[in-house]
Image (cartoon, grey):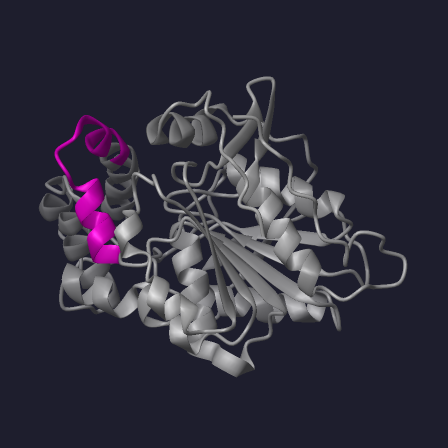
Amino acid sequence: MTVPRHARWLGNRHAQTIWGALLRRPPPITLTRELWILPDGDELAVSFTEHRPGQPGVVLLHGLEGSVAAPYLRGLLARVNAAGWNGCAFDFRGCGRPQAPARGLYHAGKTDDLSFVVERLRTRWPAAPLGAVGFSLGGNMLLKWLGETGSHNPLTAAVAISVPFDLAACAEALDGTSFFSFIYRERFLRSLRKKALAAVGRFPKELDAASIRACRTFAAYDGAVVARLFGFTGAQDYWSRCSAQGFLAGIRRPTRLVASADDPFVPVAVIPRETIAANPALSLVVTQGGGHVAFVGGTPFAPRYLADDLAIEHLAAHFPRIAGDAHASEPATLPSAPG
């Protein structure tokens, strides 16, 4: 396939990343929000596009401190809806506005909530093919779950975008000393610290407020919060046991991996190309530019989001044709994005 070109008018990886996060304007879409009770009593906010009985379904997973309100998520939900499919996205525990009351938090390897959601969706959309798309941390979560479940996984196909395949290496990149590393890191950690501090009263034995306030790096946060709350021996243990790269060999569903060579969060060297090439279920698309979860093409007045094109194309190629749906099996046409 021809790899689509990113927009050269966004001159570098930071411009791409910031545009995708702050300036993207997805088309209007009406979503229906439901609260689902998890097995441990927590509530999970799940949002749906228009219901189309019998048509394929796609569940979307957001990235770190994202939600269904994230522009990249709403943009792809709009594309899923336009394809004539059923769309769904859920806010990880403690994410979203308004937040569902959650006792627990989430992390890059916590796959039980995803498994729960997919099982519910199989009942909601019976006998229909089911796909999933995960962004960044959500992509890591999706790949880990696909690898854990192997040939028993209920999905028809999947896509993972801007995945931090090696959590340790990606934490190191974001914990760097550059100006942009600091900006990205503080944007995430400010929100993460606030949520962790709010959880201290619920988990007084596991969490320490002073340690949380002192967290200024992902290494510190993952050690003081994620490791202690979820039973890892430390940040390194969490990263080692939950990085997607360790689960790729077990994936048995056709899965497209979309990455950018200039991703400021995920160094291109961490993409496990040999492991990916060794698994026929996996396909890798690496664009020269695109930043993190951005992949902006087109023009300033008519931007095109290339990762969305790649996701829809892959899912359409693996969803069987269903009566009454003119879109479900027609591969998307990738645009030739102006330079």
The answer to whether residue 316 is magenta is no
Farthest residue, direction front: 2
Q: Number of callouts in the render?
A: 0
Question: 47 and 21: which one is in front?
Answer: 21
Q: Main secondary structure of the magenta part?
A: helix
The picture quadrant where one finds residue 322 is bottom right
Q: Is residue 7 left or right of residue 46?
A: left
- Residue at 65% across / 58% down in the picture? 315
Examine the rendering and report whether any part of residue 320 can be seen.
Answer: yes
Farthest residue, direction bottom: 152
Q: Specify the segment rendered in magenta.
A: 167-184
The picture quadrant where one finds residue 247 is bottom left
Examine the rendering and report whether any part of residue 41 can be seen.
Answer: no
- Residue at 47% across / 48% down in the picture? 62
Q: Is residue 233 above or below residue 133?
A: below
- Residue at 46% across / 25% down in the picture? 8
Residue 119 in the image, given as x and y percentages of width and height:
59, 71
Question: 124 and 287: which one is in front?
Answer: 287
Farthest residue, direction right: 324
Question: 98 and 139: which one is in front?
Answer: 139
Q: Is residue 73 left or right of residue 79?
A: left
Q: Is residue 212 left or right of residue 315?
A: left
Residue 106 in the image, given as x and y percentages of width and height:
35, 56
